Amino acid sequence: MTMRLWKIFGGLKLPGFKSMSMTQQTEAAPLPKILTLPLKQHIGHAAETIVNVGDKVLKGQMIAAAKDYVSTPIHASSSGTVIAIEEYAVPHPSGKMTECIVIETDGKDKWIECVKNANFRQLDASALRNLIRDAGIVGLGGAGFPSFIKLNPGPGNMVNTLILNGAECEPYITCDAMLMQEQSRKIIDGLNIMRHALQVERCIIAVEDNKRSAYTMLVNALQEHEAEYIDIVLIPTLYPAGGEKQLIKTLTGKEVPSNGLPINIGIVCHNVATAAAVASAVLEGKPLINRYVTVTGEGVEHPRNLDVLIGTPFSELIELCGKNRKAEQFIMGGPMMGFEISDINIPVIKTTNCILVQSKKTEPDFVMPCIRCGQCASVCPAQLLPQQLYWYARAKNFDKTQDYNLFDCIECGCCTYVCPSHIPLVQYYRFAKTEIWAQEQEKKSSDIARQRHEFRQFRMERKKAENEARKKQKKELLKKVSGTKDNADDAKKAAIEAAMARVKAKREKQSITPANTDNLTEKQKKEIAEVEARRRNAKEEN
Amino acid sequence: MLVTIIAIATLAIIFGLVLGFAAIRFKVEGDPIVDKIDAVLPQTQCGQCTYPGCRPYAEAIANGEAQINQCPPGGEAVINELADLLGVDPLPLNEEHGEHTEKTVVYIDEQICIGCTLCIQACPVDAIAGAAKLMHTVIEDECTGCDLCIPVCPVDCIYIKPVTETINTWKWPLPEINQPTLKDLMELKHHEQEQS
């Protein structure tokens, strides 16, 4: 299939280091003794625990439910007992801890009953989205955005193209490539389900041209009728061709607007691994509890891909691949966009695509002043001005960084890679982004505080006014009853008398019309009369 | 002569009417500068500036009664923003009003609380829930950390705690850069020459 391709701006040709981890078939990693499942493995709100410590859980059982719209549930990756719900270290650049459910596995790996929906074409889009949401599926390419939301075009949006991203452009990472080679049919099944949910005509699977065998396997897996609407396209190997916006530009020539989403131009983009997870969820009823993880780098003897249960500690995988003496630095993700981790006992989460084990650099990387060479601007795939952003971020002039479209930066790291002065440019952008978010958050909470304060003041005023009105009313009433202002005693007496008169009137009224006395039999009436007489006597005696 | 006087008088009346109408039609409610200043202030309503809340302080600044450096919770950031907004030079924070600290919230030791409602009355943002003779509790998300409830508590059961940073509120730090000294550069050059 030949298709016209467009060129993206900038980018880099990087050494791949991919073949080292592709020599062996993917195997399932052994069942770990302890599984640690963080409640927040995705973008959005953390899931909410629905199990207690001591509960027995089965493989695939939901253990934390989605709390909000932008949230997904978490499932037990194997059968066992919940032994703790506490804070543990998780894969995050901050190295901070967050709440996790810890399961001690029983070794039986017993599945919960799975509901299969082989005939997915009979389900409507909303039912499919619910299935995908309940299976806890998030974007497996790295960002971890809940997938069911991306399968909901929303009112007013027409989707005409569904793209499956199999570019995997970052060096070292090969988990998507292996998945495409080994489970190509599953990926296409998943694509069909997504296509049905979105009701789109055209589908494209994009593969970088350094993954020929993955391409061949996908083409072979395609059935004849499917070839009419699915294009499998080889795209030139260039970092970051697999970025969502870059991939869309390469395939369609369209650009996603700044602050916009691909859906705004009628395109939805998913990762190939997400498609495979969707196929498992719908056709087999299995939630997302495992994924392919690449363990690679010079720090391991046998770099390879593993089929890993979510919650398995990094350390077990690294040991399995033969940790050697060069293993000094551990990175989750690739060398360009990944982040260093200090504690290797953290668990694999849904977005863990690669564990890179490297030796530390011995020479110090001196940061020299910016010489305004402009190389960063020429490689920036988002066509930003990295130098300007750098100056303003360093000066904490965040308004200016936004004027230079800081939030269009995809943090690909091309500018840092080419900078001859070794300035950690992307770190400055990340710093500026999180500072801006924090400021916005602060603004929001101070607005709420202002509203609450203003309402409190309004309430106090109202209370005061009400009190005053009541006092005034009382005084007027007293005046009316007493007739004269001077005779306070008379006024009091009159008020007491009036109150007593009111009580008396009320009592009389009660004794005259007791409730529920309609439709009584003669006998009942007689009984009531007797009781009344007794009561009157008792009163008189007192 | 008479024509000139009449013509100018007519013009004066017309313009007067137009201006008078505009003054009523386009009347600005309140003082917009106060709103702008109030938007910059952190809304803790703590009163450390000696005014009974952020808005009164904003009004005082707008009237020129107060300096821009009297807000300890806002600290340097707020002073700089105010200086920008008002076109004046930034001043260092006036230590008389307090020191700038990281944001804190308070919590009530519920074992000790006697349910006197004094703290509820003191809280400027209604962030304490409770009723007479019943235990009170702080709604931490709404607490601004003004600490006004602490002095009024008769049993001293309200404590300050810092807001802990979570994964959601964590911020990337400004990169620490390793700038070479002259000695480092000389060594580097020497090393390169040796290699070539």
Image: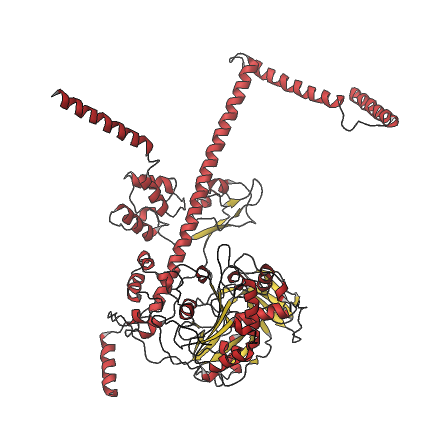
Q: Eyeballing the image, is A515 above or below A38? A: above
Count of marks, rendered view: 0
Most extreme residue toward the right is A523
The image position of residue A203, as x and y in percent, is 50, 69
Instruction: Name the spot of residue B130 as percent of width and height, x first.
Output: 55, 43
Q: Is residue A290 visible?
A: no
Q: Is residue A99 left or right of residue B193?
A: right
Classify residue B167 as left or right of residue A82.
left
- Which residue is at 52% across, 85% downward? A24
Quadrant showing the N terminus of chain B: top left
Work out which residue is located at the far left of the displayed protein and give it: B1
* On screen, residue B130 above or below A377: above
Is B33 positioned to the left or the right of B182 in the image? right
Residue drawn at the location 28% of the way across and 51% of the way down? B92
Give the quadrant of the C terminus of chain B: bottom left
Coloring scheme used: secondary structure
Q: Residue at x 50, y 54 (%)?
A: A155
In which quarter of the view is residue B60 placed? top left
User: Which residue is more in the foreground, A222 or A288?
Assistant: A222
Please state the horizontal and vertical placement of residue A81, each as a whole percent of the image. 64, 69
Q: Nearer the viewer, residue B29 or A82?
A: B29
Where residue A381 appears, x then y in whole percent? Answer: 35, 69
Residue A482 can be seen, yes or no: yes
Work out whether A252 lies above or below B5: below
Q: Nearer the viewer, residue A230 or A348?
A: A230
